[in-house]
Amino acid sequence: MKIDVAAIEKQVWSADVNLELGDVFDAVCEEHHLNTEHLEQTLCCKDPYRLVGFLQELEPAEISDYLEIK
C-alpha cells in the first residue's frame, strides 16, 4: 500500500482550526491506515504537523512500517 504524504499534508493544513491537534492526528492516521499507537510512540506526541515532517523524511519502504494494513 502506497501512502500519499502530500495528501496527508494537505489534509492536516486544511483541518478545522477548532479541532484539537490530537483529533487531527487520529483522523489522518485512521483515514490513511497508519498505526496511530506506533506513530505516537515514535514521535512522543500526537502532533499532525510533526507527523507530516516525519513521513516526508522516511523512504517509501520505511513508511510501510507504520501502516495498519501491510
Image (cartoon, rainbow, N blue to C red):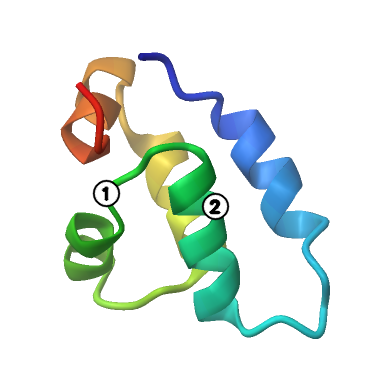
- The picture places residue 60, in percent across and down from the top left corner, at 33, 18
Image-based side of 21 in relation to 53, left or right? right
Mark 1 or 2 closer to N-term? 2
Identify the residue under disc 2. 28
Q: Secondary structure at mark 2?
A: helix
Q: Secondary structure at mark 1?
A: loop
Residue 2, by quadrant, is: top left
The answer to whether marks 1 and 2 mark residues whose Cβ atoms lie closer than 8 Å is no
- The picture places residue 39, in percent across and down from the top left corner, at 26, 57
- The picture places residue 7, in percent across and down from the top left corner, at 67, 33
Looking at the rendered image, the quarter that the C terminus falls into is top left
Looking at the rendered image, the quarter that the N terminus falls into is top left
Q: Amino acid at mark 2?
A: Val
Give the spatial CA distance, label 1 vs label 2.
Answer: 10 Å
Identify the residue under disc 1. 35
Q: Amino acid at mark 1?
A: Asn
Identity of the residue drawn at 55% across and 32% down: 5
- Mark 2 is surrounded, within 10 Å at the Cα level, by few (under 14), some (14 to 19) or many (20 or more) other residues, namely many
